[in-house]
Image (cartoon, grey):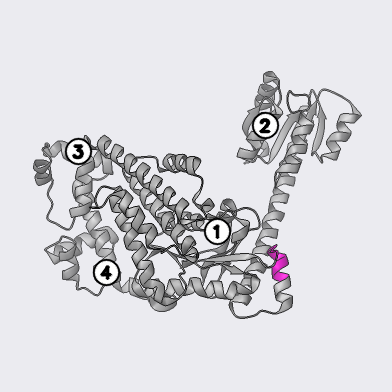
Amino acid sequence: MLNVLLVDDEPWVLEGLRTMIAWEKYGFHVCGEALSGSEAFRMIENQRPELVITDINMPNLNGLELIEQCNRLLPKPPKFVVLSGYDDFTYARSAMRQKVAEYLLKPVDDDDMNTLLTRLNASIQEDRDLEQKRMKQQLFVINHMINRFIQGESGERLRQEAAQAMKLQEPSELQCILLDVLSSSADLDEWARAYFPPDTVHSFQDSSGRTGLLIHSKSCLDGRVGEAAIELHKQLSAHAEHPITVAVSGKGRGIITIRELYRQADEVLRAKRSQGRCGLFYFCGERQRQSTHEAHKEKLDQLFNAITGEGLMSIEECVKEFIASFAGRVSEIEAAKSHVVNLEWMLCERISELGGDPDRLMSELQLEHGGLGELADYCLIGRYVQQLCMQGASKLSELKRENESNTIFHVIQYVDREFRSKLQLQELARQFHMNATYLGQLFKKNTGQSFNAYLNGKRIEEAKKLLKRTQMKISEVALQVGYPNTDYFINKFKLSTGMLPSAYRQEAEIKAAAEPGGVIDA
């Protein structure tokens, strides 16, 4: 269905348009109604309808002004049909200048409207097909050019053609994001275009089938690339069967640096794969800086523990040590910001787990202190981190107090933590001072599963990871995840997955061998 927005300052006219025309018959759905031009513009910005039917004479912003504003400000304005009670050539001429699809006089003849809607539906669909074809062709051309750079080509003609196709003003500042997952570059391109400003990002697929993004990092807001990497990793992880690794290169100037930026991101992916690690990682330069990165991460974990109340040091002390770990080096400011982005993600994830609203916390923080990308020195970053930690700690403390009365929350947390141990509903009920039957009912209400089904699910998921990541014997895996009896474990595993543990491991090894590097991320 195509969306149509109705605009008229007379409510009865809107009602007539909505009810007297069989919109669905002609492939349209009325997505909204507006009583003024200014209200209509806001709705067009938010809902992006394919068609707008508007009156001319309206308060604040008339119909012709609305059309002019949309054509001037929107990258893809909708088609417009003008309905007017004035048989005035001046109005019609103004409408033609704005390239409206049709100028109709009230009252509108039903046959004329039906014919018009049929024609507009076909026209919009044709425009949409042409745009999709154009974008597909452009994606193919740019993907081919990026791969030529990756493979070592660097001729002047290629540089000029690529700069023109990607709308690069040389020497542009570029960054590369590479995903250790096989997926469609078209899907990634669609996500990227929704997140980045137009023409500042291009997706590609390398010879191994991995997808990546080439970003004009200077064309975006400072810090946007790091935020995008976090969001990309979050979205992919939410829909993937296996943990995802995302690598972000350093920055390069000029289209000639594409090969080096790709190499940096590829080096990060290879290193993390060999370590059996998944997540979001940044290129740090020389290999010997790995220990420095680990030291920063240790300080970050220490700081997070202080926020959650699980550490021995105060937040103020941890913030000072975290900032000091970068030794005031200007070259490390972006690395410091990337660690702070990780801290934000960890904090938001914990707030979400406790039923809070992390978006509200981050919005309030950025409204008061500005975005992380705007901070240019360690003093400002330190203040930002201090406020992030203090407000985050306060929010977590508030959420914990709210959850203290919810015993089932603690029971589920306990099961998530201790599922490898021998757990029985009766023992848990005694431990948390509850009736066993009532606890079982609450458990199913909150998790959607019975206690035993939930416990077995946790154990089987852990067993899958061990079967993929280790060479432990089946009996050892069973014992590790909480099944003393190997035969019982095998039966449960087969009921859950439809496969024996040995067959599951064998299938995982075959998949891993088929992937680049022969290592599977689990």
Secondary structure of the residue carrying tag 4 is helix
Which segment is the magenta one?
Answer: 161-169
How far apart are the two marked residues, 2 and 3, measured between alpha carbons? 49 Å
Q: Is residue 226 above or below residue 83?
A: below
Identify the residue under disc 4. 467
Please indicate, yes or no, whether residue 522 appears anywhere in the rendered image. no
Q: Earlier in the sequence, mark 1 or mark 4?
A: 1
Identify the residue under disc 2. 40
Instruction: Report the amino acid beneath label 1.
Output: Asp
Q: Earlier in the sequence, mark 4 or mark 3?
A: 3
Image coords of residue 421 (percent x, y) = 14, 57
Q: Is residue 268 left or right of residue 402?
A: right
Secondary structure of the residue carrying tag 1 is helix
Q: Quadrant of the N terminus?
A: top right
How far apart are the two marked residues, 2 and 1, measured between alpha carbons? 31 Å
Identify the residue under disc 3. 407
